């Protein structure tokens, strides 16, 4: 188990133990208060008044024996009946405090319903009152239930009622657990001393188990992530959580594993792209370098042809310089997160200038169809480079045919279509035409270039929030479409 597991475990356990101690302490204080207040007191509630009325009716119609049975059978409260000499009818001890309270009520100025004077058929007078006391398990003495073990507490009466051992509030005969008086047959002393601590111990064990399970639940996926990061640092970028067992309820930790798989997939794609780019760059540089070395060797062997060798060296140097410049442009576009300074750009004017340059340099027929002025917002140099690369590509691969550039405003968008009359691209290669160093049929298309123009155009258009696509025309040739947001 790692350190994170123990941090989770101890934090959760401390919280659970604190809650357990708080709840247990509250219950213990309540029990202590009940024990301190466990001495019987005079009951003045409406049920006590009803009990006294029932005692008067019982004495009147049933006699003293019926009243004795009523007092012995009272369960929810204790009915006491004192004769004129102060003796209790069932010979039960009456605590001094309760007697004092009865005397205070008898000598009070106001009438009270808590104490009743009863008169029997033989003319004897009795004093009846009711009492209710808290019962604390394990604290019952030999006296009546709830009377404690104070002075004057005598043995309980043998008949049914409060003195019957089979009717204790603790449980079965003789208390909890049967005749032994304690829980599960244990001695009563064990229940008295250990019983109050059992709920706290059980709650602590439950908290321990719950804390261990919760800490394990949190630490397990984090350990899996740690192993995945270690593997990624060692170069293993394969998905680690794609085939994990599905969970009933997804949580943030499971989503974090999926995010790691996506991150590793992107890193793997970037690394593969870098390796492929390095391979393509080395391949593209190898040919001009070989030609440079051949031209230099020829200049040493044939001094009379030095001028031709220098011209060859110059052409190859210019070609390499153009390749390096395009690579730098592509690298900056891929690494850039924001556009350089932008401004409104008149697309119609820019396309017209690009068409004029193509007509002048290549002698090609480039026609521009723009029904209305169109303005977009972007970096002028980058947009110029993107459109120019597409137009030059159409001129190179258009087999000498005319090239049409059409601008179609469409609400908040504008579409720029560049159409040529060339051979087009094989359908299976349409998805790769915007990848760096891609050239369709390089042996058949003997044209100058490195396959970076369309890749640069794609990065520029996507940086400006647009999209670019290529498709073969039904009448022959290629259609490249640029879609950009339009400025109103």
Image (cartoon, rainbow, N blue to C red):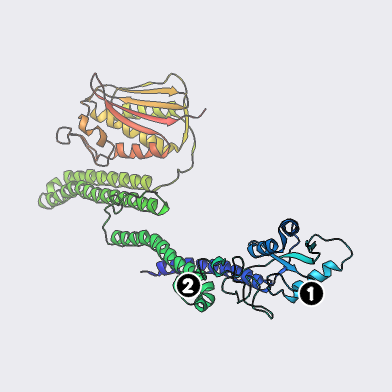
Assign a secondary structure to mark 1: loop
> Left or right: 71 with respect to 394?
right
- 113 vs 198, nearest the viewer: 113
Q: What label sits on residue 179 in the rendered view?
A: 2
Seen at 19% across and 48% down, the residue is 283
Distance, label 2 to label 1, CA atoms, is 39 Å
> Left or right: 438 with respect to 333?
left
Residue 387 in view (yes/no): no
Residue 409 placement: quadrant:
top left
Coordinates of residue 212 in the picture (x, y in percent)? 41, 66
Seen at 75% across and 65% down, the residue is 129
Coordinates of residue 355 in the picture (x, y in percent)? 35, 27
Q: Earlier in the sequence, mark 2 or mark 1?
A: 1
Q: Residues within 10 Å of mark 2 (few under 14, many from 20)?
A: some
Residue 386 in view (yes/no): yes
Between disc 2 and disc 1, the foreground one is 1
Assign a secondary structure to mark 2: loop
Seen at 46% across and 20% down, the residue is 372
Answer above or below: position of 355 versus 136. above
- 212 vs 374, nearest the viewer: 212
Q: Residues within 10 Å of mark 1 (few under 14, many from 20)?
A: few
Q: Which residue is identified by label 1?
A: 85
Answer above or below: position of 269 versus 389. below
**Is the N terminus in the top left, top right, bottom left or bottom right quadrant?**
bottom left
Answer above or below: position of 363 versus 63. above
Answer above or below: position of 124 versus 403. below
> Left or right: 28 with respect to 449?
right
- 49 vs 457, nearest the viewer: 49
């Amino acid at each position: 188990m790692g350190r994170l597991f123990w941090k989770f475990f101890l934090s959760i356990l401390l919280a659970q133990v604190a809650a357990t101690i708080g709840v247990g302490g509250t219950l213990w204080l309540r029990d202590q208060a009940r024990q301190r207040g466990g001495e019987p007191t005079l009951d003045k509630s409406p049920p006590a008044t009803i009990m006294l009325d029932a005692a008067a009716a019982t004495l009147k119609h049933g006699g003293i024996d019926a009243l004795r049975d009523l007092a012995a059978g009272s369960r929810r409260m204790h009915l006491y009946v004192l004769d004129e000499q102060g003796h209790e009818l069932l010979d039960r001890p009456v605590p001094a405090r309760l007697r004092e309270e009865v005397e205070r009520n008898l000598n009070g100025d106001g009438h009270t319903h808590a104490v009743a004077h009863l008169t029997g058929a033989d003319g004897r007078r009795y004093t009846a009152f009711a009492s209710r006391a808290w019962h604390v398990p394990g604290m019952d003495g030999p006296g009546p239930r709830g009377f404690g073990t104070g002075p004057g507490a005598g043995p309980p009466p043998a008949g049914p009622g409060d003195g019957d051992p089979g009717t204790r509030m603790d449980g079965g005969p003789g208390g909890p657990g049967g005749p032994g008086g304690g829980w599960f047959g244990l001695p009563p002393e064990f229940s008295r001393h250990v019983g109050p601590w059992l709920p706290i111990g059980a709650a602590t064990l439950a908290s321990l188990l719950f804390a261990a399970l919760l800490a394990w639940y949190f630490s397990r996926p984090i350990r899996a992530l740690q192993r995945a990061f270690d593997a990624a640092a060692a170069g293993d970028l394969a998905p680690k959580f794609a085939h994990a067992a599905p969970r009933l309820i997804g949580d943030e930790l499971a989503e974090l594993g999926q995010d790691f798989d996506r991150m590793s997939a992107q890193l793997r794609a970037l690394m593969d792209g870098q390796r492929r780019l390095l391979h393509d760059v080395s391949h593209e540089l190898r040919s001009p370098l070989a030609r440079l070395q051949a031209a230099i060797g020829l200049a040493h062997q044939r001094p009379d042809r030095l001028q031709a060798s220098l011209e060859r060296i110059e052409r190859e140097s210019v070609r390499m310089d153009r390749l390096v410049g395009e690579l730098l442009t592509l690298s900056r576009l891929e690494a850039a997160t924001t556009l350089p300074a932008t401004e409104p750009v008149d697309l119609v004017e820019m396309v017209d200038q690009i068409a004029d340059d193509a007509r002048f340099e290549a002698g090609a027929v480039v026609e521009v169809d723009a029904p209305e002025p169109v303005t977009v917002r972007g970096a002028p140099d980058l947009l110029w480079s993107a459109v120019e690369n597409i137009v030059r590509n159409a001129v190179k691969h258009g087999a000498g045919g005319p090239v049409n550039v059409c601008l179609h405003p469409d609400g908040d968008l504008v579409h720029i279509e560049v159409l040529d009359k060339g051979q087009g691209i094989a359908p299976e290669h349409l998805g790769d035409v915007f990848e760096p160093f891609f050239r369709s049929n390089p042996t058949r298309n003997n044209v100058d270039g490195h396959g970076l123009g369309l890749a640069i155009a794609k990065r520029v258009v996507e940086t400006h929030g647009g999209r670019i696509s290529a498709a073969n025309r039904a009448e022959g040739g290629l259609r490249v479409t640029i879609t950009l947001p339009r400025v109103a």
